[in-house]
């Protein structure tokens, strides 16, 4: 082998920070806070505070490989810790405050964290958890001194601690494969599983996520992650935005339609990212106040498939919705629904249909394939379905601390059932655990949910398979109406009859609230528990 003669410099999260501070020093970072005025500074000032936060962590005897946890929202302080902890070769565990107490305690204990940072309004949660976290020796509230409430956990002030630190930090280089940020799956089946991202995987994902075929980022964008920072690194935006010099706007925990609209307009946000339920609430607010023009131009939607009706409603308000597919185990981006010359050559109508009904095409760095039960790739015809598998430099190899997650060839099974078409566009037809087998034939819960999404008055719908004495399983649909809307099951059925084949029609339609998981998806596990015997009682 003839080795190349180029410099071998590790890919470091601190390298993103240094670049942003130098190349985009005055570009703003704007943050809402829990009970403080809006915070505003540039990337250079942010980098200086990250340096103090790194010094603070070292003063707490946090060393290379040590874990620290956060229970925090989308704020500048959380953003600082996402760079400070990895910068000293420690690992930041971003715990999900929307999980059940048992699961939160499990993840913090499983991570092995000794320090817990938390937002002020989460103090009651932290006080409940403290007796179950014997390894945590310091509790630090993400607050200034004036608003510090030590509570039963004797919390210290984040601002006081970093103010006591010297300015500047010498970011040293180390192995780019060192663990950086630890995220846990939402644990809808069994205990949550830990995914430990490396410096290398985070930097590569951030570089690819900003490409034109993915998020298409530039320094002219004002980006607001409405995806939580504890959820797969806020979909990578805290790193991709910094690389590209985007203005960063952080909404704290205020993700209702009115609060988002107020911040989007005040800060001229052009791009945001979040699950469909967030944008449904945002649209409802726009309709309530009768607004036609606004600054938001694009939203990246993931977490669950984008209903065509929601995409059309966003477009009617001048907002382009870009579907994507990702998961905690993939950092998270796998594909994004962006056009190509080959797609546009098929005509505008066909291109729009593909972009509306597919999760997207591959982005550089990710390989994906769809295989049958024997592990053979199925034809790329847009019809043949199978298990979606992926691999790449930001895909999990082993769950934390050391549990295999892939097959011998490095393929990770996503748990999705999918098709690939001739142009490489991927379509999720169902989750493997959600697909409904009725009399030997498959029914897609996602297609049924998408079909009903355009029915007037429907806010969100979820379809599950329920045991049936003759057909093995039959679909049951739970529909949550918009506030003030009156919906009857027979109205919904009549709407569906014109849109799906007869044998796909749900055996029961229930108008009720749809429970959601900690990441904003319909909680189908909870629905199965509630409606397990529903058809047996009809």
Image (cartoon, rainbow, N blue to C red):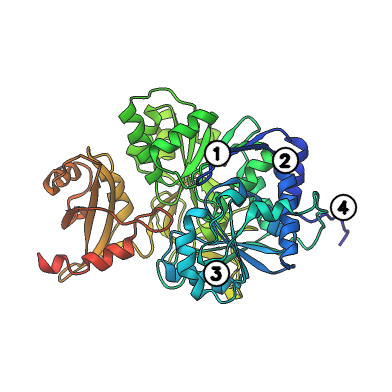
Q: Residue at x 70, y 43 (%)?
A: 46
Residue 128 visible to the viewer: yes
Q: Nearer the viewer, residue 472 or 393?
A: 393
Which class describes the residues within 10 Å of circle 1: few (<14), some (14-19), or many (20+)? few
Looking at marks 4 and 1 on the same chain, the residue that comes earlier in the sequence is marked by 4
Mark number, residue 313: none
Whether tag 2 and tag 3 are in contact, CB under 8 A, the answer is no
Q: Secondary structure at mark 4?
A: loop
Residue of label 2: 45
The label nearer to you, 4 versus 1, is: 1
Mark number, residue 7: 4
Residue, far left = 538
Whether tag 2 and tag 1 are in contact, CB under 8 A, the answer is no
Residue, far front = 146
Residue of label 1: 37
- Residue 40's quadrant in the figure? top right
- Location of residue 299 in the rendering, given as x and y in whole percent from the top left corner: 48, 37
Which class describes the residues within 10 Å of circle 2: few (<14), some (14-19), or many (20+)? some
- Location of residue 61 in the rendering, given as x and y in whole percent from the top left corner: 73, 68
Q: Is residue 264 left or right of residue 165?
A: left
């Amino acid at each position: 082998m003839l080795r190349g003669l180029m410099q071998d410099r590790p890919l470091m999260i601190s390298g993103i920070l240094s670049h942003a501070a130098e190349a985009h020093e005055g570009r703003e970072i704007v943050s809402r806070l829990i009970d403080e005025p809006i915070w505003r500074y540039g990337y250079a000032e942010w980098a200086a505070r990250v340096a103090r936060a790194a010094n603070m962590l070292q003063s707490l005897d946090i060393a290379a490989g040590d874990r620290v946890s956060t229970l925090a929202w989308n704020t500048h302080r959380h953003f600082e810790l996402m760079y400070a902890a990895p910068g000293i070769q420690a690992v930041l565990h971003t715990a999900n405050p929307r999980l059940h107490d048992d699961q939160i305690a499990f993840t913090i204990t499983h991570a092995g964290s000794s320090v817990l940072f938390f937002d002020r309004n989460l103090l009651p949660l932290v006080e409940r958890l403290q007796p179950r976290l014997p390894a945590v020796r310091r509790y630090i509230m993400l607050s200034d001194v004036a608003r510090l409430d030590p509570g039963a956990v004797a919390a210290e002030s984040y601002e006081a601690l970093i103010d006591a630190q010297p300015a500047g930090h010498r970011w040293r280089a180390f192995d780019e494969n060192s663990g950086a940020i630890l995220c846990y799956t939402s644990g809808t089946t069994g205990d949550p599983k830990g995914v430990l991202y490396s410096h290398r995987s985070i930097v590569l994902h951030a570089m690819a996520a900003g490409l034109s075929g993915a998020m298409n980022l530039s320094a002219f964008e004002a980006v607001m992650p409405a995806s939580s920072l504890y959820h797969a690194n806020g979909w990578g935006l805290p790193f991709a935005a910094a690389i590209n010099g985007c203005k960063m706007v952080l909404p704290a925990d205020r993700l209702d339609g009115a609060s988002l609209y107020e911040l989007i307009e005040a800060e001229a946000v052009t791009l945001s990212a979040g699950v469909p339920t967030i944008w449904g609430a945002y649209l409802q607010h726009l309709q309530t106040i009768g607004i036609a023009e606004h600054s938001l131009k694009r939203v990246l939607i993931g977490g669950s498939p984008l209903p065509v009706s929601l995409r059309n409603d966003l477009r009617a308000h001048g907002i382009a919705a870009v579907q994507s597919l990702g998961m905690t185990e993939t950092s998270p981006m796998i594909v994004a629904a962006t056009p190509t010359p080959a797609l546009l050559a098929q005509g505008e109508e066909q291109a729009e249909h593909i972009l509306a009904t597919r999760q997207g095409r591959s982005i550089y760095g990710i390989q994906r394939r769809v295989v049958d039960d024997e592990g053979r790739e199925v034809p790329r015809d847009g019809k043949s379905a199978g298990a979606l598998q992926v691999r790449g430099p930001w895909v999990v190899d082993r769950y934390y601390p050391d549990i295999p997650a892939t097959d011998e060839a490095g393929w990770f099974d996503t748990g999705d059932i999918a098709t690939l078409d001739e142009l490489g566009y991927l379509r999720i037809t169902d989750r493997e655990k959600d697909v409904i087998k009725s009399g030997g034939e498959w029914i897609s819960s996602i297609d049924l949910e998408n079909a009903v999404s355009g029915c007037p008055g429907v806010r969100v719908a979820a379809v599950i398979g329920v045991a049936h004495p003759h057909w093995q399983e039959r679909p049951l649909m739970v529909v949550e109406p918009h506030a003030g809307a009156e919906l009857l099951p027979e109205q919904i059925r009549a709407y569906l009859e014109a849109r799906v084949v007869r044998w796909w029609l749900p055996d029961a339609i229930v108008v009720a609230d749809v429970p959601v998981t900690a990441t904003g998806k319909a909680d189908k596990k909870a629905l199965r528990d509630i409606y397990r015997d529903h058809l047996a009682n009809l």
